[in-house]
Amino acid sequence: MNSSRKPSESRRPRLSGRRPQVNTYYRGEPALGGSSPFQKKPAPKSARRFFFGFLDIVLILVILAGLGYSLVISSKPKVLISSQAFHNRSDYQIYADGLFSQIKNRNKITYDEKAVTLTMEKRFPEITSINTELPIFSEQPTLRITVSQASLRVRSGSSNYVVDSQGVIVAPANQVPAAKNLPQITDQSGFNSKIGQPLLNVGAVDFIKTLIAETKVAKVPISAMTLPPVAQELDLRTSDRPYFVKFYLGGDALIQTGQYLAARNHFNQTGQQPAQYLDVRVAGKIFYK
């Protein structure tokens, strides 16, 4: 039996009346400029440059302000003193305030430490040294003032002065409360006594203090000490002997004092006393008259 269908047609599967569903995917069009609208856009270069430039200016101004502040010096320094034997701390403070109020002393670049020290020492002769401390991050300086000790009272003419441990006449005796407890010396050397001027050297002051200490131990009653017109001589009188004793202030105080005490003891034992003076100025030798 012959069939009119072709063989290929007989093997082709029969399709239903519906068309098969085809899945299709679409990709959105890229945004203008090639970037997503949800991405953070960078600031324009001109704005960033202005922002960072402004920060640089602010930083420079802060640094300059800090530098300027660090160079400023307060007109009221902190004054520390080692002793108030001659003046109260407030006296030194008030005078220092006046010096630091000067324009040249208001900053660390032009501050004249030498001039401040010399001016303070001239006003207060008892000052032996001044150490100035200028802080780095603060404006208040510190003055550490070393004051010498009151050592002697010296009567010159009608005036009575206080001499410090450096031998300098530092103040009238009536202005120093502790002056009444100091050893009294009469100046007959002819020296023109003036506050701020040296009357004795340091060695002479130490000599006198050693002499006083040694005679006190030996219970020798000193009645007077005098600086005669002879250079470097000190004359001592006691209340229990008619003669005076000559000392050389440039020599050894212990040796001369020892010679004097030995001679004094010798004359006490013999019962014969010098009529005028006893001279112990030469080491190893004693003269008397």
Image (tube, rainbow, N blue to C red):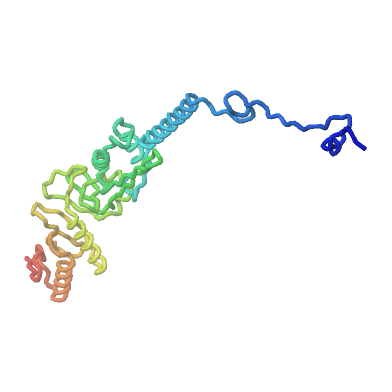
Residue 53 image-quadrant placement = top left
Residue 256 percent location from the top left of the image: 14, 67
**Viewer-proximal residue, 58 or 223?**
58
Residue 103 percent location from the top left of the image: 31, 30
Q: Residue at x 20, y 53 (%)?
A: 185
Quadrant that contains the C terminus: bottom left
Horizontally, residue 250 falls left or right of residue 63, namely: left
Q: Residue at x 65, y 25 (%)?
A: 29
Q: Where is 95 relative to 176, above or below?
A: above
In this view of the protein, can residue 278 be seen by the observer?
no
Q: Where is 276 relative to 1, above or below?
A: below
Residue 225 image-quadrant placement = bottom left
Q: Where is 235 relative to 106, above or below?
A: below
Residue 50 percent location from the top left of the image: 47, 25
Residue 142 percent location from the top left of the image: 36, 43
Quadrant that contains the N terminus: top right
